Image: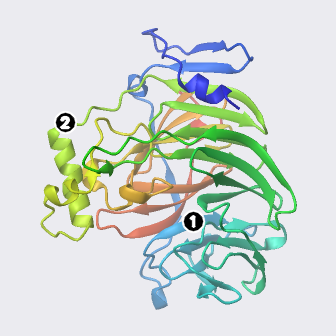
């Protein structure tokens, strides 16, 4: 589908009003234009936290090093996949610890942790975890007992994230050096169907002295199970393409407003990177030897879909960033507390404020599943409720 890159290359509308600019291209795709999102002043709403996993639970069950994924199970409990412990911990809707699923290792029912690519609730209460190192999709039942390991060709789909599309069908990226293919597949790989193929986001070239870019321009994408909707963007672009199944229905875009990075901002970033690379003094020249700072900040950190909602995450302050900005594929190192929210039809609804830096994994109905991170880097998985202004058609002005 060459249509989406062509739309992304279009110039922005010059209308200075806050009203939506709407039209269709020659293929009939609806294009919804916005001015810089900061122009919509005063539309900010806070989430209501329903449950948070506390780190004071016995046996360190509430302590998480790096949360890779989390999701609601059919019984309303919260499952959390942790990288370091290489297991899934399940909590009740009130935060009570229920059980562990899996353990670190390379045998049946074991997980690698770092290269476990997602947590996928399936029909019948089963749980699937694709694992690169174990070259398998590891299946558990609803009680946490190991069912089987499905063999998997890790040379194909190794880029996080995997996501349930509907039933037992999952959505994955199949990446090459030049393209990202967004593919629906069954767990055994017997059925595969490509939704769209896009060029990989362009990366800044290496400098003559061999330094590579500090920020990678990753693809951002999200899907909903019912109805079958799919959203696609890039970290460096202020454009979101909305699909229904294989059909591109709508493009939402807005005037770029990310700042040019001055010397002070670049120095802050390089201090963070230097400390993350083991230099306690955070000397910028340490990281300057390896990375080429960008001229402009990325446009977005993450993308999620909710019930008729499109959510775009803003960047966290540069001083709060860490080593994940160097290699993250899900933008965990970029994300901050603020998300800009659009309706599926392209209307700008307002800013959603989580209060702390967050990574959102799922939006299930009016419930957000994610992990928030305080100033000390402590991670706490949570369930939160979207404001009624976003889910019940409340006032938006």
Q: CA distance from mark 1 to mark 2?
A: 35 Å
- Percent coordinates x, y for residue 209 in the rendering: 24, 48
Above or below: residue 63 compared with residue 230: below
Res 208 seen here: yes
Q: At 42% across and 48% down in the image, what residue appears? A: 216
Q: Secondary structure at mark 1?
A: strand
Q: At 72% across and 30% down in the image, what residue appears? A: 248
Which residue appears farthest toward the right when viewing the image?
190
Local packing at callout 2 (Cα closer than 10 Å; few below 14, some 14-19, many 20+) is: few
Above or below: residue 222 compared with residue 52: above
Local packing at callout 1 (Cα closer than 10 Å; few below 14, some 14-19, many 20+) is: many
Res 346 seen here: no
Frontmost of labels 1 and 2 is 2
Q: Which residue is mark 1?
A: 69
Upstream in the sequence, badge 1 or badge 2? 1
- Percent coordinates x, y for residue 54 in the rendering: 45, 75
Which residue appears farthest toward the front when viewing the image?
208
- Percent coordinates x, y for residue 137 in the rendering: 72, 73
* The N terminus lies in quadrant: top right
Q: At 73% across and 71% down in the image, what residue appears? A: 152
Residue 33 left/right relative to 150 = left
User: Looking at the image, how many numbered discs can be counted on the residues?
Assistant: 2
Picture disc at residue 370? none
Q: Which residue is mark 2?
A: 262
Q: At 43% across and 61% down in the image, what residue appears? A: 372
Of residue 71 and residue 236, the one placed in the foreground of this image is 236
Above or below: residue 115 compared with residue 383: below
Q: Secondary structure at mark 2?
A: loop
Residue 236 occupies which quadrant of the picture?
top left
Residue 254 left/right relative to 79 = left
């Amino acid at each position: 589908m060459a249509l989406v890159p062509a739309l992304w290359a279009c110039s922005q509308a010059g209308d200075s009003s806050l009203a939506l600019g709407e039209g269709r291209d020659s293929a009939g795709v609806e294009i919804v234009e916005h001015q810089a999102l900061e122009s919509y002043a005063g539309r900010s709403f806070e989430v209501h936290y329903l449950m948070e996993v506390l780190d004071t639970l016995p046996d360190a069950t509430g302590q998480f090093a790096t949360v890779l994924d989390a999701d609601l199970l059919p019984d309303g409990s919260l499952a959390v996949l942790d990288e370091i412990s290489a297991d899934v911990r399940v909590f009740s809707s009130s935060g009570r610890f229920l059980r562990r699923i899996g353990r670190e290792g390379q045998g049946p029912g074991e997980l690698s942790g770092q290269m476990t690519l997602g947590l996928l609730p399936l029909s019948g209460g089963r749980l699937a975890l694709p694992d690169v190192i174990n070259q398998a999709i590891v299946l558990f039942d609803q009680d946490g007992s190991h069912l089987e390991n499905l063999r998997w060709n890790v040379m194909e789909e190794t880029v996080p994230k995997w996501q349930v599309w509907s039933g037992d069908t999952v959505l994955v990226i199949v990446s090459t050096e030049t393209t990202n293919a967004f593919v629906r597949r069954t767990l055994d790989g017997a059925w595969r169907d490509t939704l769209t193929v896009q060029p990989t986001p362009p990366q800044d070239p290496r400098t003559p002295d061999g330094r590579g870019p500090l920020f990678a321009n990753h693809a951002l994408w999200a899907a909903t199970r019912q109805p079958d909707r799919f959203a696609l963007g890039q970290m460096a672009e202020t454009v979101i393409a909305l699909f229904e199944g294989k059909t591109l229905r709508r493009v939402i875009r807005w005037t770029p407003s990310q700042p040019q990075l001055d010397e002070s901002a670049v120095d802050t970033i390089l201090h963070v990177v230097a400390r993350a690379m083991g230099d306690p003094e955070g000397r910028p020249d340490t990281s300057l030897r390896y990375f080429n700072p960008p001229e402009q900040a990325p446009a977005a950190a993450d993308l999620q879909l909710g019930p008729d909602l499109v959510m775009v995450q803003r960047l966290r302050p540069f001083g709060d960033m860490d080593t994940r900005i160097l290699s993250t594929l899900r933008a965990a190192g970029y994300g901050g507390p603020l998300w800009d929210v659009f309706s599926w039809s392209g209307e700008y609804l307002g800013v959603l404020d989580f209060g702390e830096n967050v990574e959102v994994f799922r939006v299930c109905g009016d419930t957000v599943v994610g992990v928030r991170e305080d100033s000390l880097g402590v991670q706490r998985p949570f369930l939160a409720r979207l404001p009624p202004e976003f889910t019940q058609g409340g006032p938006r002005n």
